């Protein structure tokens, strides 16, 4: 069950990677920080509410909603700002250059968050105050117990994914995004405001990451400015696994990776007689990444990677 | 006539700044000025021999002398040297062959752990017979072994990976570095190879083989005082060796091939360059430099653990290369120097200054903004810890505004007319 | 046995059939041209010949040896050189360096020699430089060794590309639109250069060209492609009067008459 929740979180974050990759063709390395920003937003709001004593006053569902929306909003905005400052000037550069900028942005944001939190709260390792609701679980029959935390993550993620799908395929704006992803020049010729569409893509992708951040914080409670790094890499692996640039692929990749990881955590030491233990689960994600890129770079659902021509 | 003025000027400058450092040992500025002399020497319109001589004087005579008086500066100079070597190695990979390696620190770690394991009692954990630690003179053997290990790893890693597209290659190298770190952290079970997060210590230092010579000259310095100088010269020697290797390769078909690959990979292949093989060469060579330095690092620090080899170190070296200009040897050296000084001295200086402010009890009164009691400055605001901010900023700014670096090679080359 | 034998080469890009069972022979001592309307597949064929693309079907033989699946650098080492349609010089390297790079597969690259600055290495480097200068003199770029390739005027860049391609001592030289963008005088000068190459520097030339004067002026054999298929082949005179060729270039029925 945990694996599923983890998988859906990865899927949400992976969406951010995959959308930006589809539209701009490069890896938004700083997406892991966008994700963490969402987590911090959630933490701050909860801590403020707790400090003011009004946490219990609101209905938990309402609180959750506010958290997620706030996380999405701020993450989305930061993502747009990021694009404007660090990526847009490099639009015409070879692919590696914006990647370097993205890495720089990632590092910069990590310390920026630390700085801001340090100045504001004199601490940057935050703990989410617990919400009663989340501690409960739902019992199905006598054997299966589904923790509410995980259900929340899965439910929210599914909703988001559905919403995204509808957005990208059923609205005009969504179609514009798909057009720019396929052929920016033709899209521009058709009158699509490319810059704005790209900014929107970043917003949506960032919002997904932000939502995942809030969920992450609710699920795992402990966050610091650097916690985005590992989930970021793993989600990127998930995106590649499912086929980068491909939205359903990100979801599939995320779930597969999450489940794999959960299985590994539980059974790895058992399978190898204690030699290889649960500490190696991070390892697993990297191994998957390397293997996929070598043997099937297009991922599970992806399209053929185009040949390098002259 | 003009050249001799320059020469004289430089000698004067060197002398002056050395005296400054001598009399103001706490001043970061004095040290910076002294180090800047190297930059001036490099860019002076003097014949190469003269410049080399001046640089040699600065590095081989003046620096050690200053270092003996103020050990802190010697340490900084040694650190700079290590990072210069790392930056030069990464420069070959990123700057010459155009491969973005985000996990360069992995090779550094491999070299370090190699000597750490065999140069300490660690190896006794898995090799019977209580043979370890090896005698200190094995250090030199391990320098070579380390370089070979790095080259081998680079080769093995590169073979499957170099076919990948640039950005994917970058992420995979990042993954590799994290894997190495995870291995270092976890290979203490079932067999204790690396002693996990506890690290390995104490590690053998190289032997003071020249001690008899010194004693014959009537000097009996303490080993503790001798070792910092010893390491400084070792680092200097290695850096010089690396520079020689790079320069020789640059002016050869190999160097030209690398440049061509960086310019236009497809055209390079069509001109008969075995692209993958050349990339592998660059990859393995850069790796070997890092690994050799790793061996030295382990011996110098006497203690290593997985935390010395994180992603941040890799990005730090990358920032150095990008700051100085990808593909430029002098640029890599400059970049390494600037970034190291930034981190070790400036940030720390800032921290100390802020601490001073905090304790001074001063209350700032700003018009419109009201008063602010400086002792209220949050303790968490510790500039020395904000290396990532600096690295990140450097990367973003350099890449947007000066993609060819400060001292980029081939300035003045335009694009071919028409298409492409 | 012809120097170059292409048999039934086909290449598909997704749904687009770029080349359809194209066969072509180039004999030693021959200047052959490949013509056809835009998009006919000429550059695609060149890419297959130089190893940048891999043919889906068919075979390419050079001096009796199959080139299928070889990497571009292996093909160059085997004796085929090329220039590119939209000039792919190494812009940030000097003129001399560009030609030296072209020699890569023919020079001594022993690492040991390089690192030790062995006498053998220094002698080989001097030799290479001398040869490069000879090639530059051949194409009329002597004295400009230290200029940046990217700074050269257009016509000189094309000449440099040829010098670079010649550096690897090819027996067959593929030239992709060598006179594109040139005025008639420059084109004539280039024609003269190409003819001078024959026999002394290369055994055969294969050109892709749009300039009909050049094609008709120096070719021994002309092959015409249209929509990926070979529609005619023969001497310049034969091809010129071929109604299918005229139709391919001018469209069906609208114009009539000959070119």
Image: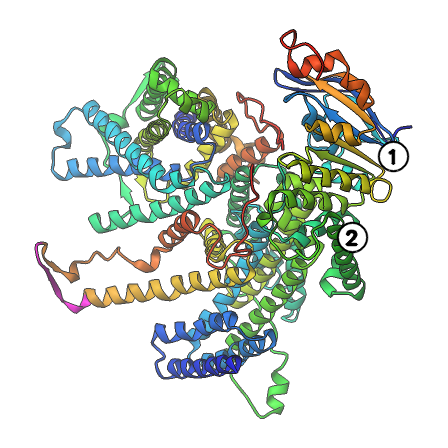
Seen from the viewer's position, the closer of residues A101 and B347 is A101
Specify whether residue A278 is in view: no
Query: Which percent across, then down, holds residue B107?
Result: 58, 53
Q: Residues within 10 Å of mark 2 (few under 14, many from 20)?
A: some
Q: Quadrant of the N terminus of chain A?
A: top left
Q: Which residue is mark 2?
A: C107
Seen from the viewer's position, the closer of residues A250 and A130 is A250
Callout 2: residue from which chain? C
Residue in the image at 56% along x and 74% along y: B233
Query: Which percent across, then down, holds residue B416?
Result: 57, 44
In magenta, the rendered stretch is: B359-368
Specify whether residue B334 is in view: yes
* Left or right: C257 as drawn, with respect to C60: left
Query: Which percent across, then down, holds residue A163?
Result: 33, 18
Q: Which residue is mark 1?
A: C29
Callout 1: residue from which chain? C
């Amino acid at each position: 069950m945990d694996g599923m929740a983890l998988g859906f979180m990865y899927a949400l974050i992976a969406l951010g990677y995959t959308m930006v990759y589809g539209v701009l063709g490069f890896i938004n390395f700083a997406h892991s920080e966008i994700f963490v920003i969402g987590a911090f937003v959630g933490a701050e709001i909860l801590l403020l509410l707790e400090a003011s004593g009004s946490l219990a006053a609101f209905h938990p569902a309402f609180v959750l909603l506010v958290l997620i929306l706030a996380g999405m909003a701020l993450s989305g905005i930061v993502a747009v700002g990021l694009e404007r400052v660090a990526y847009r000037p490099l639009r015409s550069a070879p692919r590696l250059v914006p990647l370097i900028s993205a890495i720089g942005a990632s590092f910069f944001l990590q310390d920026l968050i630390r700085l801001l939190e340090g100045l504001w709260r004199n601490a940057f390792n935050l703990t989410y105050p617990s919400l009663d609701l989340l501690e409960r679980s739902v019992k199905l029959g006598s054997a299966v117990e589904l923790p509410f935390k995980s259900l929340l993550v899965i439910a929210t993620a599914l909703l988001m994914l559905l919403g995204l799908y509808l957005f990208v395929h059923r609205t005009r704006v969504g179609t514009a995004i798909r057009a720019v992803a396929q052929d920016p020049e033709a899209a521009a010729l058709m009158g699509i405001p490319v810059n704005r569409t790209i900014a929107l893509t970043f917003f949506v992708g960032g919002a997904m990451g932000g939502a995942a951040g809030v969920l992450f914080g609710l699920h795992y409670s402990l966050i610091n400015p650097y916690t985005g790094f590992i989930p970021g890499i793993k989600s990127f692996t998930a995106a590649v696994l499912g086929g980068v640039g491909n939205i359903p692929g990100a979801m599939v990749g995320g779930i597969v990776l999450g489940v794999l990881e959960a299985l590994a955590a539980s059974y790895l030491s058992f399978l190898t007689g204690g030699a290889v233990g649960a500490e190696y689960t991070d390892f697993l994600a990297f191994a998957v990444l390397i293997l996929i890129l070598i043997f099937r770079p297009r991922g599970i659902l992806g399209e053929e990677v185009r040949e390098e021509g002259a | 006539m003009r050249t001799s003025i320059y020469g004289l000027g430089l000698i004067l400058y060197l002398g002056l700044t050395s005296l400054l450092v001598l009399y103001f040992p706490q001043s970061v500025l004095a040290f910076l000025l002294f180090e800047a002399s190297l930059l001036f020497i490099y860019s002076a319109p003097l014949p190469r021999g003269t410049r080399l001589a001046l640089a040699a004087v600065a590095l081989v005579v003046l620096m050690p002398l200053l270092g003996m008086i103020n050990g802190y500066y010697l340490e900084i100079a040694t650190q700079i040297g290590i990072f210069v070597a790392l930056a030069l190695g990464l420069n070959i990979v990123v700057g010459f062959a155009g491969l973005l390696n985000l996990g360069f620190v992995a090779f550094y770690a491999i070299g370090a752990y190699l000597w750490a394991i065999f140069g300490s009692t660690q190896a006794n954990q898995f090799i019977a017979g209580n043979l370890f630690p090896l005698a200190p003179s094995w250090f030199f053997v391990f320098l070579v072994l380390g370089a070979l290990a790095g080259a081998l790893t680079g080769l093995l890693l590169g073979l499957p990976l170099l076919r990948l597209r640039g950005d994917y290659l970058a992420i995979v190298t990042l993954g590799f570095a994290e894997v190495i770190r995870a291995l270092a952290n976890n290979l203490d079970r079932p067999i204790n190879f690396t002693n996990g997060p506890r690290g390995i210590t104490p590690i053998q230092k190289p032997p003071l083989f020249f001690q008899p010579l010194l004693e014959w000259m009537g000097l009996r310095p303490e080993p503790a005082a001798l070792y910092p100088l010893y390491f400084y010269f070792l680092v200097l020697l290695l850096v010089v060796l690396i520079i020689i290797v790079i320069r020789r390769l640059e002016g050869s078909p190999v160097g030209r091939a690398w440049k061509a690959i960086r310019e236009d990979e497809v055209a390079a292949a069509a001109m008969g360059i075995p692209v993958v093989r050349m990339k592998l060469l660059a990859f393995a060579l850069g790796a070997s430099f890092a690994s050799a330095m790793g061996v030295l690092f382990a011996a110098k620090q006497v203690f290593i653990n997985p935390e010395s080899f994180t992603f941040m170190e890799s990005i730090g070296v990358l920032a150095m290369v990008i700051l100085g200009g990808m593909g430029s040897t002098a640029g890599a050296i400059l970049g390494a120097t600037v970034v190291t000084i930034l981190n070790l001295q400036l940030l720390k200086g800032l921290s100390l200054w802020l601490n001073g402010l905090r304790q001074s009890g001063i209350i700032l009164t700003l018009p419109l903004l009201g008063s602010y009691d400086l002792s209220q400055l949050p303790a968490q605001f510790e500039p020395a810890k904000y290396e990532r901010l600096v690295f990140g900023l450097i990367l973003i700014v350099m890449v947007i505004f000066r993609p060819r670096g400060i001292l980029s090679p081939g300035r003045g080359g335009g694009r071919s007319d028409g298409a492409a | 046995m012809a120097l170059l034998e292409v048999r039934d080469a086909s290449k598909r890009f997704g749904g687009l059939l770029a080349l359809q069972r194209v066969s072509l022979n180039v004999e030693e001592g021959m200047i052959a041209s490949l013509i056809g309307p835009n998009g006919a597949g000429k550059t695609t064929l060149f890419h297959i010949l130089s190893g940048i693309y891999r043919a889906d079907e068919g075979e390419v033989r050079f001096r009796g040896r199959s080139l299928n699946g070889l990497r571009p650098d292996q093909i160059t080492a085997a004796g085929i050189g090329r220039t590119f349609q939209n000039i792919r010089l190494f812009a940030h390297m000097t003129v001399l360096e560009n030609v030296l790079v072209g020699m890569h597969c023919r020079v001594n690259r022993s690492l040991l020699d390089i690192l030790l600055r062995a006498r053998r290495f220094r002698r080989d480097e001097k030799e290479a430089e001398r040869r490069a200068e000879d090639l530059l003199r051949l194409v009329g770029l002597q004295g400009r060794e230290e200029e940046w390739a990217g700074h050269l005027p257009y016509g000189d860049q094309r000449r440099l590309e040829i010098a670079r391609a010649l550096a690897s001592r090819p027996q067959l030289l593929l030239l992709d639109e060598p006179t594109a963008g040139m005025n008639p005088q420059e084109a004539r000068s280039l024609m003269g250069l190409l003819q001078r190459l024959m026999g002394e520097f290369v055994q055969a030339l294969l050109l892709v060209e749009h300039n009909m004067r050049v094609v008709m002026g120096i070719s021994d054999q002309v092959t015409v492609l249209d929509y990926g298929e070979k529609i005619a082949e023969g001497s310049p005179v034969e091809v010129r009067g071929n109604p299918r060729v005229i139709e391919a270039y001018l469209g069906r029925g609208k114009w009539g008459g000959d070119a």
